[in-house]
Image (spheres, rainbow, N blue to C red):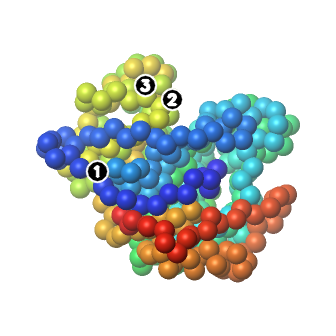
Amino acid sequence: MSTDLAMTPGEYAQCPNAPRQHCAIPLAARQSILGEGMRIRRLLPHTDKRMIGAWCFFDHAGPVDVSDGPGVRVGPHPHTGLQTFSWMVDGEILHRDSLGYKQLLTQGQVNLMTAGKGISHSEESPEISARSATLQLAQFWIALPDDKRFIEPAFEHYATLPKWEQDGATITLLVGDWLGQQSPVAVHTPLLGADLTSQGATTLTLPLEPGFEYGIAVLTGSAQVDEHALEPGTLLYLGKDRSGFTLEIKEASQIILIGGEPFGEDILLYWNFVARNADEVRGFIEQWEQGDQFGTVVGFEGASLKAPPLADNVRLKQK
């Protein structure tokens, strides 16, 4: 579901008139409507903030009614230099990849695919008889550091994650080590990811690692951090040098917090690739078109996706 909007990196946002610990920037998502009326809110990369730690991509898909029709169908497509992290908020998606994995992802579970030197996969809704009425998904990409970006590809499914109740909310630890809990999800740079869900209004005071930078987004409902109101379609960049923050949840809501140690390398994000320069991107496109390097996805009934051409005169900005 993340293959239709090709993005390239740009510059970081600045907060020239605020102390670094109070550097909060609301970032409006780029939105599109795909088949089945699926709303995609692209929260990262943003023209004013390309990455938060190694998190370089954040799509919020849905919620959408998929009780009838073909549902979601994303044909085989390649990835390099990253990990795809899929958090199923509601419904289910069937994953297939060129390593031979076939995995149904259902509510409250995570699929982590490490592309490394190259992998291809497809995503689709199961048959209507085995399908929930509603689909909602948060999908992220995690940039791999230079010494890991050409590792062997891999796939892991996490059926359960650390979950606990705190001050009227349910916290699910997606990635990292936080509040005395540790996620089993294997990543290659210091990161945090958490889902904060409440059935009504509440206030959470939560600790943060000052060396990390953070962002927070509402999937459903509404909340407030400092003077900033949070609604679906906005990512609030919290900056770094914060030891904590207060989250005022206004109603039944589902909220995502991401963070990480600032990524120390320049990356180039084009289509489904995390590269370091335009020549690498051209090489990946050529490899995909030639049918090598990325393997074959077996079982998806439909055509593979074609890479958008990279013109010789295109201007690509790195992080």
The Cα atoms of the two marked residues, 1 and 3, are separated by 24 Å
Tell me what residue is drawn at x 57 percent, y 62 percent: 271
| In the depicted structure, whether residue 249 falls above or below residue 183 | above
| In the depicted structure, whether residue 28 falls above or below residue 230 | below
Badge 2 element: strand
The x and y percentages for residue 30 are 49, 43
Q: Do the residues labelled 1 and 3 touch (CB within 8 Å)?
A: no
Is residue 64 found left or right of 246 in the rendered image?
A: right
Q: In the drawing, what numbered circle is on residue 13?
A: 1
Which is in the foreground here, disc 2 or disc 1? 1
Q: Nearer the viewer, residue 52 or 270?
A: 270
The Cα atoms of the two marked residues, 2 and 1, are separated by 25 Å
Tell me what residue is drawn at x 25 percent, y 30 percent: 226
Q: In the drawing, what numbered circle is on residue 66?
A: none
The Cα atoms of the two marked residues, 3 and 2, are separated by 7 Å
**Residue 53 seen in the current view:** no
* Earlier sequence position, callout 1 versus callout 3: 1
Q: What residue does disc 3 label? A: 222
**Residue 62 seen in the current view:** yes
Q: Nearer the viewer, residue 52 or 110?
A: 52
Which is in the foreground here, disc 1 or disc 3? 1
Q: What residue does disc 2 label? A: 220
